Amino acid sequence: MGILNQVAEYLYLKKKDPNAPKSEWLKYMHGINRISILLFLVGLVILAIKLLRR
């Protein structure tokens, strides 16, 4: 369940853990992960639309 919790934190569905370590590099990594998850979801939506239009 750790991965699902992390994804929920990335997408602002769950509050962040206040005891988690904080650093600039970690913040950059989480930002890049947010972007990649959102692009993946957009790609899935586009793929679903293309498959349903056939």
Image (tube, rainbow, N blue to C red):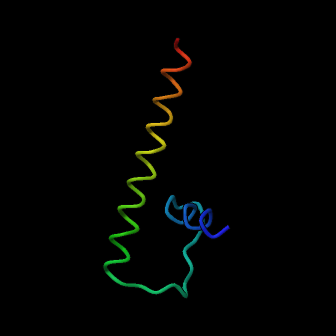
> Residue 21, how many percent across, how many down?
46, 87
> Residue 28, how many percent across, how many down?
32, 70
Residue farthest along the top direction in this orientation: 54
Quarter placement of the N terminus? bottom right
- Does 50 sit above or below residue 37? above
Residue for point 53% across, 20% down: 51
Displayed quadrant of residue 30: bottom left
Residue for point 55% across, 61% down: 7
- Does 38 sit above or below residue 16? above
Residue closest to the eye, 42 or 3: 3
Residue farthest along the right direction in this orientation: 1
The number of callouts visible is: 0
Residue for point 49% across, 43% down: 41
Residue 52 appears left or right of 1: left
> Residue 31, how many percent across, how many down?
37, 64
Residue for point 45% across, 52% down: 37
Displayed quadrant of residue 18: bottom right
> Residue 27, how many percent across, how many down?
36, 74
